[in-house]
């Protein structure tokens, strides 16, 4: 785990859902939605104490001894758990799948994104071995960071040949939503995974009146949320998020996101707008 929290944080959302443990197709959360509220609380302390630019690991060490300091508000963890339940419920309508519960490993995405390539390669080999021991043949991802790591990076660094598909490619929601909104794209989905149109199709299918802008929400130059650098320079990450909110709010006060990092980072600075994960609308 990249943060000093109990592993139960990762799977408590599914305890009452009775998902299969023995399926060769698994829903894989990589604990990212579950960790997002903790990351928000953690980076607030980083900003408060001026801990940045390489001192990330020292603060992790401190919080490992005083983990109660990074307990987020219950409303934030409940929001994340609801998102996960919504995704699982929609998937159950179209595909048979299982879940690894306490055996689900973290993907190691943070190691890769912070540049620890040797440590990431070693870790990816361990995760690949876990999947093979569990006889996993197909993985359903639910966030862009995990999807990119498994789909693009794992095959380059380890003997990973498992089929990876994203939940957005599978679900067929039939609920109608009376909402006017704009969309903040995940940089990975939009520009690195060729999934720019996929969340838009889903929003159109459920009746959301989608507001776009040639620059602000375009595939090529739409802005980042700032989240990828929040563990290194949280003050700059917040400034990027503030600018992104200013731009998006010119289009709509309702902003749809499709990534837990975007959800967390934009929510930190949002005051007069609503930040809504697409899965909350399902």
Image (spheres, rainbow, N blue to C red):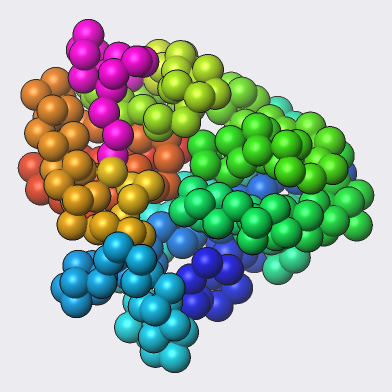
Q: Residue at x 36, y 15 (%)?
A: 219
For the stretch drawn in magenta, the main secondary structure is loop
Task: Name the spot of residue 199 as percent of width and height, x first.
Answer: 45, 22
Q: Residue at x 40, y 32 (%)?
A: 186
Q: Quadrant of the N terminus?
A: bottom right
Q: Is residue 273 above or below residue 206?
A: below
| Side (left or right) of 251 relative to 52 | left
Kindly indicate the quadrant of the structure image that contains residue 46: bottom left
- Near-viewer residue (123 or 92): 123
Task: Name the spot of residue 121 as percent of width and height, x first.
Answer: 70, 53
Residue 275 seen = yes
| Side (left or right) of 274 relative to 160 | left
| Side (left or right) of 199 relative to 17 | left
Q: Is residue 59 above or below residue 218?
A: below
Task: Name the spot of residue 251 as percent of width and height, x first.
Answer: 14, 21
Q: Residue at x 44, y 83 (%)?
A: 61
Q: Is residue 94 magenta?
A: no
- Near-viewer residue (251 or 145): 145
Q: Which residues are magenta?
A: 205-225
In the displayed orientation, state which residue is furthest to the bottom: 65
Q: Is residue 225 above or below residue 33?
A: above
Q: How many labels, in total?
A: 0
Q: Residue at x 64, y 61 (%)?
A: 119
Q: Is residue 216 magenta?
A: yes
Residue 138 seen = no
In the displayed orientation, state which residue is furthest to the top: 214
Kindly indicate the quadrant of the structure image that contains residue 102: bottom right
Task: Name the spot of residue 87 as percent of width and height, x first.
Answer: 56, 41
- Near-viewer residue (14 or 157): 157
């Amino acid at each position: 785990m990249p943060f000093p929290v109990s592993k139960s944080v990762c799977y408590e959302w599914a305890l009452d859902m009775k998902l299969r443990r023995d399926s060769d197709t698994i829903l894989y959360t990589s604990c990212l939605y579950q960790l997002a509220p903790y990351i928000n609380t953690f980076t607030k302390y980083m900003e408060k104490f001026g801990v940045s630019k390489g001192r990330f690991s020292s603060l992790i060490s401190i919080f490992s001894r005083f983990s109660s300091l990074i307990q987020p508000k219950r409303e934030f963890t409940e929001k994340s758990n609801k998102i996960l339940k919504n995704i699982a419920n929609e998937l159950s309508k179209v595909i048979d799948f299982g879940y690894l519960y306490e055996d689900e490993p973290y993907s190691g995405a943070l190691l890769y994104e912070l540049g620890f390539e040797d440590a990431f390669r070693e870790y990816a080999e361990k995760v690949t071995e876990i999947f093979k021991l569990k006889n996993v043949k197909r993985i359903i991802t639910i966030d862009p960071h995990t999807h990119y790591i498994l789909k693009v990076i794992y095959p380059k660094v380890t003997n990973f040949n498992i089929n990876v598909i994203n939940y957005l490619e599978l679900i067929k929601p039939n609920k109608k939503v009376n909402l006017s909104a704009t969309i903040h794209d995940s940089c990975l989905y939009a520009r690195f995974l060729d999934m720019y149109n996929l969340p838009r199709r889903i929003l159109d299918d459920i009746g959301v009146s989608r507001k776009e802008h040639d620059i602000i929400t375009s595939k090529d130059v739409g802005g980042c949320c700032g989240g990828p650098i929040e563990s290194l320079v949280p003050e700059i990450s917040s400034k990027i998020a503030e600018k992104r909110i200013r731009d998006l709010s010119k289009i709509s006060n309702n902003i749809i996101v499709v990534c837990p990092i975007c959800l967390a980072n934009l929510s930190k600075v949002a005051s007069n707008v609503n930040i809504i994960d697409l899965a909350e609308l399902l």
